[in-house]
Amino acid sequence: MKKIIIIIGMLLTTFILAYATSPTIKINDYQPKNHDEKVIKQLLVKLQEGYNTYNPEIVLAAHAAGASIAGSGTILSKEEYVHVVPRRLAKSKELGLKIYFYAPQHIDIKEDSGKVEVPYDLIFDNIKYSEKGIFKAKLVKKQSDWLISESRWKVTEKIGKWPLK
């Protein structure tokens, strides 16, 4: 009986910690603290929209010229990504990809550069694959806009095998 109570206590603790540490505020509902954060939020919302509508122009517009973009185990320049992203998004559409960004865990803004770390969920409707992680981006300010100069997807949890090449 004592073992059962200990096991139940451990399971409850695990579930409570998992719930308490999982992101709950979606990027659309995030309240920026200043103008720069507002523009960065708009950039992330637009990037999410680009992926979820499978629109390569929107995805590419979020990145600065010469940006370094990580995806599917490779790092490409924006100039290389231009040739890859339409095919990847077409395959993503076929598989039912959806990406959900949450409120930034970290934003560091300097005069014309910055960094942002955003939790995300990535889900495919038509296959058994999903992942959670942190989208990490280095940012550059061009006039009054912020653009991504470098991006990485740090997977923290996944179920299934990555379907895109």
Image (tube, rainbow, N blue to C red):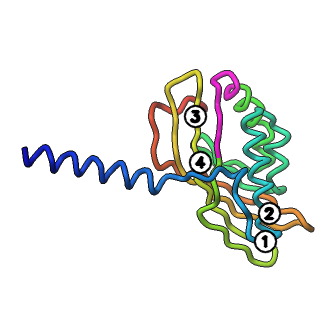
Residue at 73% from the left image edge and 50% from the top image edge: 28
Q: Is residue 59 left or right of residue 70?
A: right
Q: Residues within 10 Å of mark 4 (few under 14, many from 20)?
A: many
State how far apart marks 2 and 1 are (Cα). 6 Å
Q: Residues within 10 Å of mark 3 (few under 14, many from 20)?
A: many
Q: Are marks 3 and 4 in contact (CB under 8 Å)?
A: no
Q: From the viewer's perspective, is the residue at label 4 or at label 2 nearer? A: 2
Disc 1 marks which amino acid? Answer: Asn
Q: Which mark is residue 34?
A: 1
Numbered label tally: 4
Q: Position of residue 16 (x, y in %)?
A: 37, 52
SS for callout 3: strand
Q: Which mark is residue 120?
A: 4
Which of marks 3 and 2 precedes in the sequence?
2
Q: Quadrant of residue 74?
A: top right
State how far apart marks 3 and 1 are (Cα). 31 Å
Q: Are marks 2 and 1 in contact (CB under 8 Å)?
A: yes
Q: Is 58 inside the magenta-drawn segment? A: no
Which of marks 4 and 1 precedes in the sequence?
1
Q: Quadrant of residue 58?
A: top right
Which of marks 2 and 4 precedes in the sequence?
2
Q: Nearer the viewer, residue 151 or 18?
A: 18
Disc 4 marks which amino acid? Answer: Tyr
For the view shown, which residue lies furthest in the bottom direction? 111
Q: Are marks 3 and 1 in contact (CB under 8 Å)?
A: no
* Residue annotated with mark 3: 123
Q: Nearer the viewer, residue 75 or 98?
A: 98
**Which residues, given as a range, are shown in magenta?**
91-100
Q: Which mark is residue 38?
A: 2
Residue at 58% from the left image edge and 53% from the top image edge: 119
State how far apart marks 1 and 4 are (Cα). 22 Å
